[in-house]
Image (cartoon, rainbow, N blue to C red):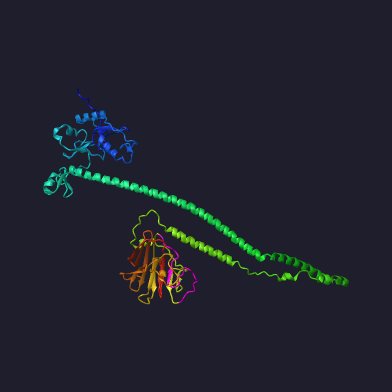
């Protein structure tokens, strides 16, 4: 019995995964068709996710569908193959991006196959001889491509079929004889098979890397969520505590007001009665004065003598004149106490906030590289001022507390627990955080080789009283200092001195701190930035810039 001819488009029998004719076709739940091996391989990669999808419409299946061969479709494909694919061509003109048929005369049709033996592309009509004629059976057909020139040897105009592993390049058979004699040669198919294995390994590594990064992503998300929860709880606790503190301060304010009023009342307790009595006596005396004036004007002698005795006895008591109220009662002690309380509270809050600002987080950030050019450093510049409460009495401050000069005459500074009383030193008021950069410039006359300027950073706990190492920049574990002498540089920390090879060439020194990275860098600043020394450590407290100068020298914080 003759087979019924098939009048369908060949594209209906192409697997979307391998883009070739269906082999062992299966139809999945959404209705799309695939080669059995293609869809199995595709879903094998989805096993880890546990969700399976159609490569075309992306419909998801929570349970991996059971695959069964579509026997009707398989018979159609078999008939198509047996009849030499004499399907009714879905002819359409080639678009600009399509490969065109090299055999069409006049209007070019879209090519469906490219023959690597003929080095030409064919439409549905002109490719038929390759299916029908035994002369073309050994030709290699591939999906139509516009990149046919990449398949052809540019030197010999022959198909590229070989790969030279020695030179790592494509070639044709003539190239092998002429230029690659003795080299290790394989077919492109063999090389592809080898590289396919490598591709599989690469894909496995990529999948492993994806899994590692997804795991890390999940960990980071959990860490971020935990940080946010902790931060919210801390905000709520701090709001509650601040509210309680404000209430406590308000209670103390009322108590202080009551104490002042009690003192006021105590001072004026008896005075109010005396004031009223004095006011009454003054009124009585004014009336008596009027009566006396009237009596003095009378012409009746009898009336005068009769009223004189009673009017001459003046009202009032001399005791009231002995009452004394000091006009100099002072409440300044109360005001001073409240002011001191305010300053202590502000200092305490600042120290605690600084300490909280420098607590390490559980997430380590990837720090950007350290700047190279001065312009890059200047974007991290910080505005610093010298702290008058820390300056030694032989140092004077000027220019808005940005210049320190060492003299031989002591200044009349008030006593302060943070003042250096022995070493010629001063700290800045501001602490540095994150990435910070500042520059100082020295001037003056050197007295000797050992004299110099000290550019330092220290913790707030650096000692201030006495001449011990605990108070000296660099000679303890709480400070680091660069010493610039007449002809040399040195760095000191924890009583360890390191002499630097660089010879001073500039009067300006740059300091760069990356707190989180734990780096402290000193630079000689001129037309270029010359790194003098870099300290790598782990900072545990806020850092305060500090400076020391000898007699006759001056340091200026640069803007």
Toward which corner of the image does residue 152 lie, by quadrant? Answer: top left
Q: Is residue 335 magenta?
A: no
Locate residue 522, reporting x and y percent: 35, 66
Task: Point out the image quarter for the C terminus.
Answer: bottom left
Spot the residue most to the top.
Answer: 1
Instruction: In this rendered view, identify the residue nearer to me: 178 or 433.
Output: 433
Q: Quadrant of the N terminus?
A: top left
Rendering coords of residue 393 (x, y %): 46, 73
Q: How many marks?
A: 0
Taken as a whole, is the magenta stretch helix, strand or loop?
loop
Where is residue 248? Give x, y as percent.
55, 57
Q: Is residue 16 visible?
A: no
The answer to whether residue 20 of the structure is visible from this angle is yes
Q: Residue furthest right?
A: 302
Horizontal side of 282 relative to 214 (left or right) equals right
Q: Quadrant of residue 372?
A: bottom left
| Residue at image point 36% right, 48% down | 217
Q: Is residue 123 above or below residue 472?
A: above
Q: Quadrant of residue 80?
A: top left
Write the start and end of the magenta stretch as one range: 409-433
Q: Is 61 above or below relative to 374?
A: above
User: Which residue is more in the foreground, 94 or 167?
Assistant: 167
Q: Is residue 417 magenta?
A: yes
Point out residue 27 in the picture as x, y percentages from the top left corner: 29, 32
Image point (37%, 65%), residue name? 511
* Residue 459 or residue 305, whichever sits in front: 459
């Amino acid at each position: 019995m003759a087979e019924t001819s098939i009048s369908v488009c060949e594209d209906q029998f192409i697997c979307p995964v391998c883009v070739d004719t269906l082999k062992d076709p299966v139809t999945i739940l959404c209705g799309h068709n695939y080669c059995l091996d293609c869809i199995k391989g595709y879903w094998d990669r989805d096993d880890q996710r546990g969700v399976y999808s159609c490569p075309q419409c992306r419909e998801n299946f929570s349970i991996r569908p059971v695959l069964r061969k579509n026997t009707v479709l398989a018979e159609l494909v078999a008939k198509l193959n047996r009849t030499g694919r004499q399907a009714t061509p879905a002819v359409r003109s080639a678009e600009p991006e399509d490969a065109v048929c090299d055999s069409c005369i006049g209007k070019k049709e879209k090519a469906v196959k490219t023959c690597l033996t003929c080095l030409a592309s064919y439409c549905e009509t002109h490719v038929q001889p390759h299916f029908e004629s035994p002369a073309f059976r050994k030709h290699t057909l591939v999906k139509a491509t516009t990149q046919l020139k990449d398949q052809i040897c540019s030197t010999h105009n022959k198909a590229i079929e070989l790969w030279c592993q020695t030179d790592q390049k494509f070639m044709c058979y003539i190239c092998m004889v002429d230029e690659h004699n003795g080299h290790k040669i394989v077919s492109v198919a063999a090389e592809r098979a080898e590289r396919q294995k490598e591709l599989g390994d690469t894909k496995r590594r990529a999948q492993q890397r994806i899994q590692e990064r997804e795991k890390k992503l999940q960990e980071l998300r959990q860490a971020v969520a935990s940080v946010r929860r902790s931060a919210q709880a801390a905000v709520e606790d701090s709001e509650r505590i601040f509210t309680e503190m404000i209430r406590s301060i308000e209670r103390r304010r009322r108590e202080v007001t009551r104490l002042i009023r009690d003192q006021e009342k105590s001072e004026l307790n008896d005075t109010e009665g005396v004031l009223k009595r004095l006011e009454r006596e003054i009124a009585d005396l004014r009336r008596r004065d009027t009566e006396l004036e009237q009596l003095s004007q009378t012409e009746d002698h009898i009336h005068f003598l009769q009223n004189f005795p009673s009017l001459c006895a003046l009202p009032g008591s001399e005791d009231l004149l002995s009452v004394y109220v000091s006009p100099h009662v002072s409440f300044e002690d109360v005001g001073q106490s409240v002011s001191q309380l305010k300053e202590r509270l502000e200092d305490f809050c600042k120290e605690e906030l600084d300490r909280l600002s420098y607590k390490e987080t559980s997430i380590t950030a990837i720090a950007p590289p350290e700047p190279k050019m001065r312009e890059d450093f200047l974007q991290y510049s910080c505005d610093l001022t010298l702290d008058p409460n820390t300056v030694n009495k032989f140092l004077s401050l000027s220019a808005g507390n940005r210049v320190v000069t060492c003299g031989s005459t002591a200044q009349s500074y008030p006593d302060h627990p943070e003042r250096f009383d022995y070493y010629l030193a001063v700290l800045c008021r501001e602490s540095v955080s994150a990435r910070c950069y500042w520059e100082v410039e020295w001037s003056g006359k050197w007295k000797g080789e050992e004299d110099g300027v000290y550019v330092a950073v220290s913790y707030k706990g650096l000692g201030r009283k006495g001449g011990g190492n605990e108070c000296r920049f660099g000679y303890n574990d709480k400070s680091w200092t660069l010493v610039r002498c007449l002809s040399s540089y040195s760095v000191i920390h924890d009583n360890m001195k390191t002499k630097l090879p660089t010879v001073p060439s500039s009067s300006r020194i740059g300091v760069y701190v990356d707190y989180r990275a734990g780096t402290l860098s000193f630079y000689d600043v001129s037309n270029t930035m010359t790194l003098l020394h870099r300290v790598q450590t782990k900072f545990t407290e806020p850092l305060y810039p500090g400076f020391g100068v000898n007699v006759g020298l001056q340091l200026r914080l640069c803007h």
